[in-house]
Amino acid sequence: MTTYDAKIALRREAKSRRAALHETLSATAPLEARDVFLNTPELAAEITTDCVVAGYWPTGTELDPRPLLKHFHERGLTCTLPTTVQQGSPLTFRLWTPDAELAASSYGTMAPSPKAEALTPELILVPLLAVDSRGMRLGYGAGYYDASLRVLRARGRVVAVGLAYDDQMAETVPTESNDERLDWLVSERRVLRFAIT
């Protein structure tokens, strides 16, 4: 089986698993994940007073990052949401506030107006279908986050934090040379920090 085929098979399984988790945990897990993040000193230390944070608008059965984003906004941090350009290209991150007007975007998500200021994030909350103990993430296959992290890391330091239900962990995520590793994973139960190898 090729890596491509292995990803397709795992993606199908991971979507089903996440849907079942979402059905039972979606009301509580976003608040629990927020608290896990904020109660982990090493992770909270990644957030400086002038940090630009990128979140995402949840679609389908993704773990909802909005409680965490709202907390960051209330702390006075600058928050952004991604907008897509073309498949495989880096995302553009535009200014977001809780009262910002959003418009429907690609893949059923919502995004700020194209007139909203584009900013460079230093911490990115990343949705996922599965992740393994190396920090390798399985997304939807369009390559947006991998391309974004590659460009941002070439410019300087950026921290990638996956948000997921705890049982989205996989034994091994098939990887290719252009797949980018997460730095952290936050779930409703725990935080994992991935070692750089």
Image (cartoon, rainbow, N blue to C red):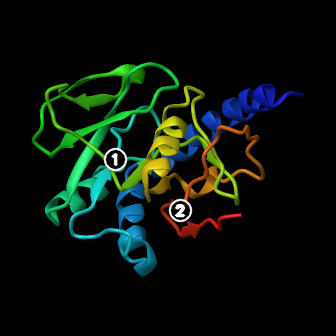
Three-letter amino acid code at disc 2? Trp
**Viewer-closest of 20 and 183:** 183
Q: Amino acid at mark 1?
A: Gly
Looking at the image, is mark 1 or mark 2 earlier in the sequence? 1
- Outermost residue toward the left in this view: 99
Quadrant in the picture for residue 34: bottom left
Mark on residue 55? Answer: 1
On the question of residue 131 being in view, the answer is yes
Residue beneath disc 2: 184
Is residue 23 visible in the rendered image? The answer is: no
Q: Residues within 10 Å of mark 2 (few under 14, many from 20)?
A: some
Name which residue lies at 66% across and 50% down.
Answer: 136
Numbered label tally: 2
38 lies above or below 94: below
Q: Are marks 1 and 2 in contact (CB under 8 Å)?
A: no
Closest to the observer: 48 or 112?
48
Report x, y in % for residue 85.
38, 22
Question: For this view, does 127 lie left or right of residue 34?
Answer: right
